[in-house]
Image (spheres, rainbow, N blue to C red):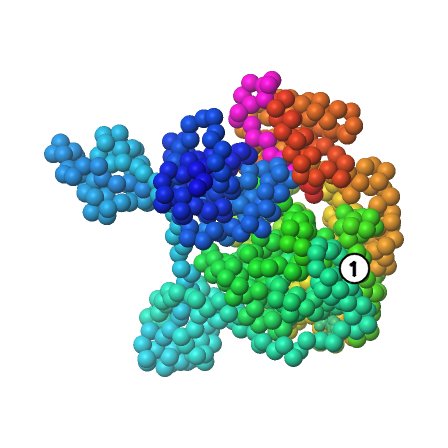
Amino acid sequence: MPFYADIVFPTAVRQPFTYSLPDERVRAEVEVGKRVWVPLQKHKAIGVVVRIHEQTPDFNTRAVEEVLDEEAVLSGELLKLTRWMYRFYYCGWGETIQAALPAGLSFQAEKRLRAVVQSIPEHLDEQKANIVEEVQAAGSYSLKEANKRWNDKIIQQLVGQKLLEIWEEPSMKMAPSTENLWDWKKESSCREAQQLVKAYEEEGKNYKWVRALNVLSGLDLPAFQRELTPHDLLEHYTLNRIAEEGLLRVREVESNNLSLKHDHDPSQLKTLNEEQQTAYEQLEVALETGGFASFLLYGVTGSGKTEVYIHALKKALSQGRGGLVLVPEIGLTPQIVKRFYTIFGDDIAVLHSRLTNRERYDAWRALQQGEKRIAIGARSAVFAPVQDLGLLVVDEEHDASYKQKDPAPRYHGRDVAIMRAHINDAVVVTGSATPSMVTLQAAKKGKSKLLTLNERPFEATLPDVDVLDLKQYRSAMRGPLAVPLFNAVEEALERGEQAILLYNRRGFSFYLQCEHCGEIPECPNCSVSLTFHKSKKQLRCHYCGYAERQPRQCRECGHEAVNPQGSGTQRLEEQVGTLFPEAKTLRMDFDTTSGKNAHANILKAFERKEADILVGTQIVGKGLDFPDVTVVGVIDADTELAFPSFRSGERMFQLLSQVAGRSGRAGKEGRVFFQTWQPDHPAMVAAQKHQFREFARQELAQRKALQYPPFSRLIRFVFKGKREGRVRSVALAFTESLARTIGSEDPVLGPSPAPIARMQNYYRWESFIKIKPTNGAGAIEQLIDRTFDRYEKDKPKGASSVRINVNVDALE
Ligand code: ADP
Ligand code: ZN
């Protein structure tokens, strides 16, 4: 019988805590991977058991109070994965476990109030007496709710007087997901609505809600909000307006409708062409052989990589094994999901960031129970509890969204997928038209096998790319478009085709500037300028969310003209509207895609040809496949170069190549334009000519000379605190410890203020080290452990107020 359990919590503390298993019941129930309820410092907390043993520690242990799960929430396989992760990415084991569990299975504890006394003392004033009475009546009361409802000082007093007490209990609740269901208020409402519309029309009044009502009266109700939203007019807000007229009513109903509304038709599986077949066969052999194998599927956009994944997944399923497909967050479009759904139907669980906790939990359960055998999702889906994992796919493996920045664990989804394949003796395929230098180098060294697709099906050719030198076109611009791009868009519109115009940032450079003194309003919390959002007449910070009203005067000098500067997607949309008054435009950027299905709806509308021009940020550049798009223009192809990073050339190349692949699919000829101030930049030239290999050759040579990844592993340390002096001295002291630990072998860079030197009121400094790329989890853990040991011995005053974040394989 085991007597002790090692338990981890979702904190940065890296050592597990040992607890005793006090009685038979607990001992019988406890299991590695289950959650338990334990005392921690002065509180109670939920932890996960990572080991059970009989080694009596040399300190007094506290006891596990309760085992919370009937079945382990974390399988042995995922436990191994999280163990590797916390060592490799140098964070808490509990942090990696938390990342691996769906939000519904969190570690959260809830503080609750309960009454200590049976009867209320007479001297108590009325308000307090009422509170105690209510808490008593309720049995227990959430402290958070109580603090919201009553004055938190009074609650504290009642606790101090020992009339109420606070205790904690595991919060295991998961709210069922609900959806709004709209229906006519009365049976006669629909008829009334039609009469009302008529009446307003006769008066010549053209209110938005009346137009909406007109649309609505032709639809089948009841209908879910999500079914109505795709109609331009039928937004929640407008429906509410109609409800105020007494015509509509809305109910919240539990949505247990997880299934997708696509057609499941496995017969649509495509026959692979020769190249695809050759690539597939290698995967097939690896799957049949069994054991770990890694592949890089390199093929231009549209060369049919997805079809190869689909065939390989089918093979894995036929072997009784499961599959996992990772795509970049913004690549998880309905189009991609549909293609997998058509072949695999309900065998697929789609995990995207917009699921409610409930939906995510349901999908997670279905996978864990083996009811669904394939998971598809963005970064965090790498932890999906697919049973008997046989094949992992990482599509667009170069995409930066695979790397989690904050909070810890700062993991790379692709690399975690490769490790998970290792643990499961599975096959992993990373695919890209523009593989990252890291993956390419791995293929060169034979760590993964290169599979290549050179051609596009249907003989669709790669489009011609025109690089437009903005210096030359200075006097030949139509608004933001150089004349050749303008002409191409105009001609496409005349032919009834579509165009995409890409502006490589969200509002970023759309800021306000005083025309008198040049002052640009900055965020009070972060050292960045505020972005101007015209539609809301607001200034907003894209880092912390700070917002303020558009100022009338300059804060510096009081001058009254504060003008919008630069250009953003909003402005571009306006300008395009002026240039092509007949065309309908849609905008897709961070601001227009924040709603639950907004992203999908914009794409659907564009696909249905409800608009002629799509204007957007790089969100537009990825994973889209529109047959009627024949012109793609990048308004500012150089933007990436403005970021101070050794990867900026790689990023620019990737972005431009992805964009270039958008046009000219399915047989139609396509044209692509890059507008640039640097037409001779090697990344620009290579992207223009679709020359990945040439670009990679130059880039790798340069990286090698400078010992940048993939020829080193980059670890970034960020020091954050509210007092600049302290941040600086901690950065200096820690970096000194780093240098001494490493010795002279590998370079230490910094410390220096971070590129954004202040964020959310925290000052930020950073240091980097480059270590040999062959260093794995053990070496990294040891190196940083030793650095911390050294640093702890003579850390500067006030060091505890400065946080030190570690980011292994930082992409910055
Ligand atoms: P990638 O994933 O490399 O960007 P896709 O798999 O999306 O490429 O393929 C591009 C287009 O070609 C898609 O519309 C796809 O359906 C089609 N396609 C790919 N392979 C085949 C095939 N073997 N037979 C018919 N159509 C194919
Ligand atoms: Zn800010």
Question: Residue sitting at 71 percent across and 76 percent down?
Answer: 270
Ligand 1 placement by image quarter: bottom right
**Along the viewing direction, whichever of 287 and 745 lies nearer the viewer:** 287
**Along the viewing direction, whichever of 470 and 255 lies nearer the viewer:** 255
Q: Amino acid at mark 1?
A: Tyr
Can residue 330 be seen here? The reply is no
Q: Quadrant of the N terminus?
A: top left
Horizontal and vertical percent position of residue 369: 50, 62
Question: Residue sitting at 84 percent across and 45 percent down?
Answer: 700
Horizontal and vertical percent position of residue 629: 72, 70
Instruction: Left or right? Give the position of 540 relative to 291.
Output: left
**Along the viewing direction, whichever of 159 and 213 lies nearer the viewer:** 159
Q: Residue furthest front?
A: 1
Depicted 315 relative to depicted 679: above or below: below
Over which residues does the magenta segment extend? 792-808
Q: Quadrant of residue 387?
A: bottom right
Question: Residue sitting at 42 percent across and 35 percent down?
Answer: 20
Q: Quadrant of residue 606?
A: bottom right
